[in-house]
Amino acid sequence: MKYVTQIEQCNIKRHQVKGHLNKSSILLFLMRDNEGANEKNVMHQEYEFIFSLRPTPDLKMKKPLILGIYNGAFGTLEPSMRSATFRAKPILDTPLSNQLALYVIQELLLCGEGDMAYLGNMIVSMGDYLVKRHNMQQEIDTKLKMGLSPFQVQRIQRYILQHIDRPVQTSELAMVVDLSVHHFIRVFKKTTGETPHQFVTRLKLEEAKKLLLSTDESVIQVGMGVGCDNPSHFSQLFKSNFGIPPLQFRKAFQASLQFAS
């Protein structure tokens, strides 16, 4: 099923978003700012691209959908477009979405939004893919009945992030929510759609991606910082999840920012 047909409007600013919204609105954002970041270590180039996309007639929506990439993470924003309303959506973060975002952002920074003819299809494809992934998550959520509570999942995530620099065992996570390992594995997969190992790996790689964009640490240091002592294994893991090796990922962003400056 196709979800998006074409771009309706480009060059939308954050403060203009509410005026463009209705129940069937789809907005794609590609944004970076330095809010809350360590200015000493962050690449300072900021950008803000917001597109209004036209949904297909058979896409039934109850409210507007605002989704895209913000400071290297995929997720959604509320209509206010305030940074504090950003919610990361792991299901949107795939090798394909990363490759599309890298290409589109680089081209927009180099060429601007004056002539969208050559980029239009790529932007529509990116929007269509993200809406598809978002709807997949909604379908998963509706099928989940008995599982871990949101509070329990938050506790598990907090524990993993607190011990991000070392391996985290499934038995440890089961203890965090006071469940047997067997029962924990079953309800965890039912609640999140991932095994505990997949969940831990994804959080570690998301943290690695942030470090690659916001620090000057070497790829080896970044890998060690998220508990991967084997540089080769870290690179393979990163590429299998995001479709691009960590060093190439960093260089692609740095190159696009240098060309745009």
Image (cartoon, rainbow, N blue to C red):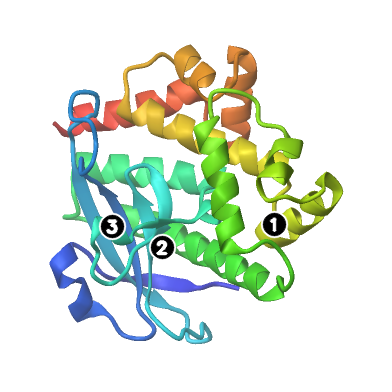
Give whichever of discs 3 and 1 has the lower sequence position: 3
Give whichever of discs 1 and 2 has the lower sequence position: 2
**Circles 2 and 3 in contact, beta carbons < 8 Å:** no
In the rendered structure, the answer to whether residue 172 lies left or right of residue 121 reads right
The outermost residue toward the front is: 178
Say which quarter of the image contains residue 139.
bottom right
The amino acid pointed to by label 3 is Ala
In the rendered structure, the answer to whether residue 163 lies left or right of residue 70 reads right
Q: Give the image location of residue 90, x and y in percent.
A: 53, 51
SS class, disc 3:
helix
Residue hosting label 1: 193
Look at the picture and state if 74 lies above or below 259: below
Q: Nearer the viewer, mark 2 or mark 3?
A: 3
Q: Could you tell me how far apart the alpha carbons at marks 2 and 3 are, in whole angstroms?
A: 26 Å
In the rendered structure, the answer to whether residue 105 lies left or right of residue 212 reads left
Q: Give the image location of residue 163, x and y in percent.
A: 55, 30
Characterize the local packing of mark 3: few (<14), some (14-19) or many (20 or more) Cα atoms within 10 angstroms: few
Residue hosting label 3: 84
- Whether residue 116 is visible here, answered yes or no, is no
Residue drawn at point x = 57 percent, y = 37 percent = 160
The amino acid pointed to by label 2 is Val
User: Tag on residue 124?
Assistant: 2
Look at the picture and state if 21 lies above or below 105: below
